Amino acid sequence: MAQVEVGGNGQTGGASFSAAARAAVEALLAPVDADLARRYPGERGTRQPVHTVYVPADAFGADTVRDWGRRALEAFDTHAATPAELARALGVADDELLADVHARVRAKLEREPVEDLRIDFEDGYGPRPDAEEDAAAVRAAELVAAAVAEGSAPPYVGIRIKCLEAPVRARGIRTLELFLATLLAGGGLPDGLVLTLPKVTYAEQVTALVRLLEDFERRAALPAGRLGFEVQIETTQAVLGPDGRATVARMIEAGEGRVTGLHYGTFDYSAACGVSAAHQSMDHPVADHAKAVMQVAAAGTGVRLSDGSTNVIPTGPTAQVHAAWKLHHGLVRRSLARAYYQGWDMHPAHLPTRYAAVYSFYREGLGPAAARLAAYVAKAGGDVMDEPATARALSGYLLRGLDCGAVDPAEVTALTGLDRARLDALAGR
């Protein structure tokens, strides 16, 4: 085989690429490089909550989070007082792992029962006289500001406004304005503030909210881009446009970097597809299709995904609660396996199975994930030869487990030899 020598200047001894050709390539791809960096910045590098709790604005009070925690604990202690009883409820093996999960779930319900709270001014609240909704928007902001000040607010909290379709547009804008202005007057915007825009059908509605938030920031002397928002995907037009394009990707683009999440709306979307009420579920084929489109559209953009909810409420006698818990646990585990790391919870009694599913998911995979990541870092190989992209995924998996309390920093470090900073770096945060 002929040998080709490369000189110190990087040129081969014979034929080579010219400086002009190299410069032309750089000129050609410079806009592509810039576009990739803008559109696909990667993970946000901050904690993602495992769920969102929706509470109607008229039912929200100073004790809402504590009340949800109390009621969740009451359900847990009544219907799953021991690991064995929890195992029977979920239909899983009663083993040492579940005993650990049981203890962690109880501690979580005592310490931080709600990770993300959304005060609902849309379907859960409904149409009200303007004076009543005005007062509710101000009251919600005052309660949030007080909770933040005393340290009792969940890590993430905010409101879901009415959509921007013509019949309710002015009302939704007015509620958002009152809520934000009252927060500012009461001490400023909390770090974990989240706004949710429901029932989006056209990308222009996303653009409209961007323009409103830009205007608010200018008038309130806030940093540009301070206000972001989630988009709820609960209409067919949000997934597939009349031209056959994936509309959700256009909505992310229309957000101009402000869209932080895409939340699947189980019941509105299913109904829009003609699915009968008895079959509307997070695991229906129409749901899987919509969520797959959302997932591809959001990949690499830093926009996070959330699954929907089940409307089967765990109340009544123990047998009925266990049946609802088994359903909910299975749906949450299914979502996690499909890389939907967040979902909605509609009732305090959903919290025990939310955390049981999340904690078992991360604890079951802790050992294998840590071993693979340690082998990757040590270049030791092992049974699986992982790529850098898989190392990012393994690090992200461990970080999610740490963030929600499923695993502890000391055990992750002991298994991987890596501290939080190294995990963040490997995950690309």
Image (tube, rainbow, N blue to C red):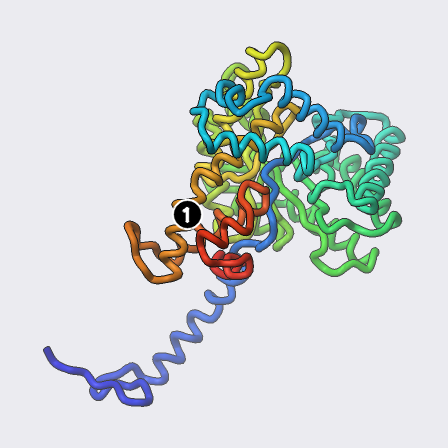
What amino acid type should be assigned to the residue bearing mark 1? Ala
Q: How many marks?
A: 1
Residue drawn at the location 50% of the way across and 21% of the way down: 84
- Judge left or right: residue 146 versus residue 320: right
Instruction: Work out whether 160 lies above or below 372.
Output: above
Q: Answer few, some or many: residues within 10 Å of disc 1's Cα (few below 14, many 20 plus, some between 14 and 19).
A: many
Judging depth in this view, the residue of 172 and 88 nearest the camera is 88
- Judge left or right: residue 37 versus residue 378: right
Horizontal and vertical percent position of residue 120: 73, 32
Horizontal and vertical percent position of residue 180: 81, 46
Q: Is residue 378 visible?
A: yes
The C terminus: image quadrant? bottom right
- Judge left or right: residue 207 versus residue 38: right
Horizontal and vertical percent position of residue 391: 41, 55
The residue most toward the left is 1
Task: Name the residue carrying label 1.
Answer: 369
Which image quadrant for residue 150? top right
The N terminus: image quadrant? bottom left
- Judge left or right: residue 419 versus residue 61: left
Q: Is residue 233 visible?
A: no
Judging depth in this view, the residue of 172 and 151 nearest the camera is 151
Which image quadrant for residue 125? top right
Residue drawn at the location 78% of the way across and 58% of the way down: 222
Residue drawn at the location 44% of the way across and 55% of the way down: 416
Judging depth in this view, the residue of 317 and 230 nearest the camera is 317
Secondary structure under tag 1 reads helix
Horizontal and vertical percent position of residue 407: 53, 44
Residue drawn at the location 55% of the way across and 51% of the way down: 409
Instruction: Work out whether 161 lies above or below 78.
Output: below
Instruction: Work out whether 238 lies above or below 74.
Output: below
